[in-house]
Image (cartoon, rainbow, N blue to C red):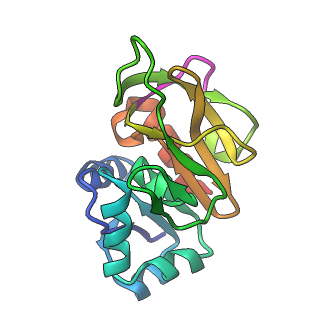
Amino acid sequence: MSIVLVDAGGTNIGSVRYALQRLGVDAELTADASTLRAADKVILPGVGAAGPGMQRLRELGLVDLLRSLTQPVLGVCLGMQLLCTHSQEGDTDCLGLIAAPVRSFVHKPGLRVPHMGWNRLVALQPHPLLTGLGTDDQTYFVHSYAVPVGDYSLATSDYGGAFSAVIARDNFYGMQFHPERSAAIGAKLLQNFLEL
């Protein structure tokens, strides 16, 4: 099975790659269109801002390619947000693969932004990506923008209100948290993606 990481400049690429190595998978880091097309699974990692993230994908000529992929594709953190239609961050048009907006957290007293820390995942519907997720399992988040809950949501978390923690549409999946930094449950959810 060939797993590739899109070389989109995200600062979490190394940690995602290492997490996959712990699962026995040596994922290739690439921006090569033919390699991405031929892969069994594609992961779009990302840490940073939506505008520069989309600019990097445009510069690499990967926007239309990513939109055309038919194998399972997983966006992680910013990578998940880039799968959506539009981000309030920098008023950025994204890939439009999942019909969801990305919105900034509403500032409330006692609510620090960015949201950083461990939060419980709540599954909304059964899905192979969530196999083994317990009712008290928590994952690690670092983000200032979030996807509201919608019919694309597989699991939510709560930070001043519910938001989408895992989303899906067709062969495109997203995890807002960092599975590579989320201990055993993060490893399990990554393994689930590899087994889709």
Q: On the rendered structure, is 143 left or right of 127?
A: left
Residue 131 in view, yes or no: no
Q: On the rendered structure, is 193 left or right of 21?
A: right
Q: On the rendered structure, is 8 left or right of 76?
A: left
Q: Position of residue 30 (x, y in %)?
A: 31, 75
Q: On the rendered structure, is 100 left or right of 58?
A: right
Highlighted range, magenta: 134-140
Residue at figure coordinates x 44%, y 57% from the top left: 91
Residue at figure coordinates x 68%, y 58% from the top left: 169
Q: Position of residue 58 (x, y in %)?
A: 37, 78
Q: Residue furthest bottom?
A: 34
Residue 31 in view, yes or no: yes
Count numbered badges in the picture. Answer: 0
Residue at figure coordinates x 56%, y 75% from the top left: 67
Q: Position of residue 128 (x, y in %)?
A: 68, 46
Quarter the C terminus occupies:
bottom right
In the image, is residue 38 above or below residue 26? below
Residue 27 among those drawn in magenta: no
Rendering quarter of residue 134: top right
Rendering quarter of residue 113: top left
Q: Position of residue 33 (x, y in %)?
A: 41, 85
In the image, is residue 180 above or below residue 66? above
Given residues 23 and 119, the one toward you in this image is 119
Residue at figure coordinates x 63%, y 26% from the top left: 122
Given residues 26 and 34, the one toward you in this image is 34
